[in-house]
Amino acid sequence: MSKISKEDLAELHEIFDHFDKDKNGSIESSEFSALLNALDAEMSESEVATGLRALDEDGNGTIEFDEFATWWTSR
Ligand SMILES: [Ca+2]
Ligand SMILES: [Ca+2]
């Protein structure tokens, strides 16, 4: 992960929590789809699935905060 300030990290946590609708600490595909919509990235279901797999570094099928932070800071 690239260097990130405490403020940025707090902001990232807010964004993450906002999209983690069920507050289980990870972003599932439906939540990831809502996130992409919010970013104006209209994507098909298969594109969402591909994107999720690209972010999902440990391959457990969901995006945890560290995976999200890595992606967000490298966008
Ligand atoms: Ca969730
Ligand atoms: Ca994961």
Image (cartoon, rainbow, N blue to C red):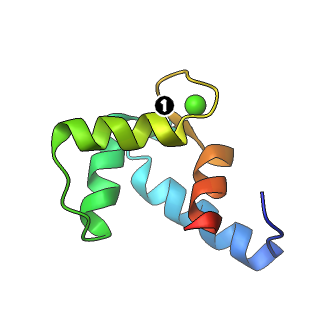
Asked whether residue 14 appears in the rendered view, the answer is yes
For image coordinates 32% across by 69% down, the residue present is 39
Q: Quadrant of residue 25?
A: top right
Residue with the mark numbered 1: 62
Quarter of the image where the N terminus is located: bottom right
Quarter of the image where the C terminus is located: bottom right
CB of mark 1 near ligand 2 (< 8 Å)? yes
For image coordinates 49% across by 40% down, the residue present is 54
Which SS class for mark 1? loop
Question: In the image, ligand 2 is in what quadrant?
Answer: top right
Q: Nearer the viewer, residue 68 or 23?
A: 68
Give the left or right position of residue 65, taking residue 45 as reference: right
Question: The residue under label 1 is which amino acid type?
Answer: Thr
Q: Quadrant of residue 70?
A: bottom right
x, y percentage for residue 23?
Answer: 48, 41
For image coordinates 70% across by 69% down, the residue present is 10
Image position of 51 with respect to 69: above or below: above
Image position of 53 with respect to 18: above or below: above
x, y percentage for residue 66?
Answer: 69, 46
Q: Nearer the viewer, residue 32 or 24?
A: 32
The outermost residue toward the top is 60
Asked whether residue 30 appears in the rendered view, the answer is no
Image position of 63 with respect to 34: above or below: above
Q: Nearer the viewer, residue 21 or 50?
A: 50
Crowd band around label 1 with a 10 angstrom C-alpha radius: few (<14), some (14–19), many (20+): many
Q: Nearer the viewer, residue 35 or 42?
A: 42
x, y percentage for residue 18?
Answer: 44, 59
For image coordinates 51% across by 55% down, the residue present is 17
